[in-house]
Image (spheres, rainbow, N blue to C red):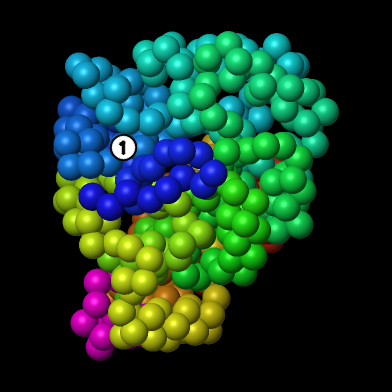
Amino acid sequence: MQYRKFGKLDKEFSALGFGTMRLPVIDGQDANVDEAAAIEMMRYAIDNGVNYFDTAHPYHGGNSETVVGKALSGGYRDKVAVATKLPPWEVQTPADFDRLLDEQIAKLGCGHVDMYLLHCLQWKWWPMLRDMGILEWLEGARKDGRIAEAGFSFHDNVDIFKEIVDAYDWAFCQIQYNYVNEDVQAGTEGLKYASDKGLAVIVMEPLFGGTLASPGGAVGEIWSEANLDPVDTALQWLWNKPEVSLVLSGMSDMQQTRANIASADRSGVGSLSAQAAETVERVQAKYGEISTVPCTKCRYCMPCPTGVEIPQNFEYYNAALTFEGNARSLHRNLYVAQRDEQKAAACIQCGLCEEKCPQGIAISSLMPVVDKELS
C-alpha cells in the first residue's frame, strides 16, 4: 500500500480510503447491510494496508456507523482512523451538536472520532451552522477528546468553498472530484486552493457514483481501443495529482475491494502514463458531448413524498442516452417495468428533492423529460 502525507498534519494515510456508503446489502434494501460480507471486506482492506475509514450518520439508513464499529472490534480499531460526519439537516438547536456526536460515538463503539466532518456543506447549511456557533463547538469537542481533527465535506460552488476554507483552521476537507468534474463544485481550482492553505484534500466520488466504472457506447469504445481499465485509470488520474491526499472508494463487494487495493499499490504522483493521460482527455471530451444528468446516486433526495425513485430514473435516463442498441432498450424496459408511483411521470414538482440535492440538479423540471425519453 502507498501512503501519502495528510496536509499540514504529521500523519500519513493510505492512498485508498474505504468509503462505507455503498456496502453490500440484502434483498436490495439499502438499510439492510450484509454485515458478514461488509465486515469481511473491511478487515481484508485493513489487513492489506488501508487505514482510513469514512462513514456518516445517514449512510445505509443510519446503520453504516454501527457496522463499521463491529468491523473495527477485535483489535482493528487501533489500526485505522475513523471519519464520520455531522448531518446539518438534523440540527435544530446547538444542543444537537453534542447529541449527534455522542450518538455517533456510541454507534461506532470507538470512544472518539479521529476525523469529524461537517457533512455536505453548501449555501444553505454553512451559514446556519456558523451562526449557531459550530466552529466554537468544534474547538470544545477537540479539547474534550471526542474528536481529534475537524474537517468538512462540500457540495456547492468554488466561491463558497473558499469562504469555508478561510473561516477556520481546518485539518482537511472532502470534495467531489474526478476527471469529468474538474470544473464542477470545488473542482480543480478548489483542490489547489485548499492544498495551498495546508488542508489535506480527500476525494469522494472518484468514479462519479459508478458512472465512470462501466462505460458503454462511444466512451466504452475509447477505453477498449486504448486497452485500459477505466476504473484503474480514473483512480490513477487522481493519485497522479500531488494535491490529492486520499481517494475514497465506496466498495460494494470483495472483488472491488481487491481491485482497488491493487490499484492503490501501484499509485503515485507522476505515475500516470502518457497513454492513460491522453485517453482520459479523449473520454472527457466525449462525455462533454453526451451531457447526461450529473446524478451520483447518493440518495439524499430520497424519499420522495409520492414515491418516485429519482436516482433510479436518472440512471435509466443516463444509460439510455449514453448507450445504444440493446443496452438502450434494456434501460427503457426497466423504466417501464417500475411501479407507476416510482416513475418520473409521478413527480408533482414539489421541489423538496431539489433542496437536498448536492449536485444542484433541477430534478422537478427534468422528471417530465426523463419520462418522455424512457416511455
Q: Residue at x 18, y 27 (%)?
A: 36
Question: Residue 271: percent from the left, percent from the top?
Answer: 31, 71
- Is residue 219 magenta-colored? yes
Q: Locate residue 11 relative to residue 124 in the image: left or right.
A: left
Over which residues does the magenta segment extend? 218-231
- Considering every residue shown, the one lying at the far right of the view is 131
Query: Taken as a whole, is the magenta stretch helix, strand or loop?
Result: helix
Q: Quadrant of residue 212?
A: bottom left
| Amino acid type for the residue under numbered disc 1 | Asn
Q: Which residue is mark 1?
A: 51
Residue drawn at point x = 38 percent, y = 16 percent: 110
The quadrant in which residue 291 appears is bottom right
Category of crowding for the residue at label 1, using alpha-carbon neighbours closer than 10 angstroms: few (below 14), some (14–19), many (at least 20): many
Res. 27 in view: no
Establish if 100 lies above or below 289: above
Q: Nearer the viewer, residue 295 or 153?
A: 153
Please, what secondary structure does the residue beneath circle 1 have?
loop
Give the total of numbered labels: 1
Rendering coords of residue 293 (x, y %): 55, 65
- In this orientation, does residue 97 appear? yes
Does the segment drawn in magenta span residue 37? no
Give the camera-side residue of 353 and 309: 353
Q: Position of residue 355 (x, y in %)?
A: 70, 44
x and y, in percent, of residue 143 in the image: 60, 15
Q: Is residue 350 above or below residue 206?
A: above
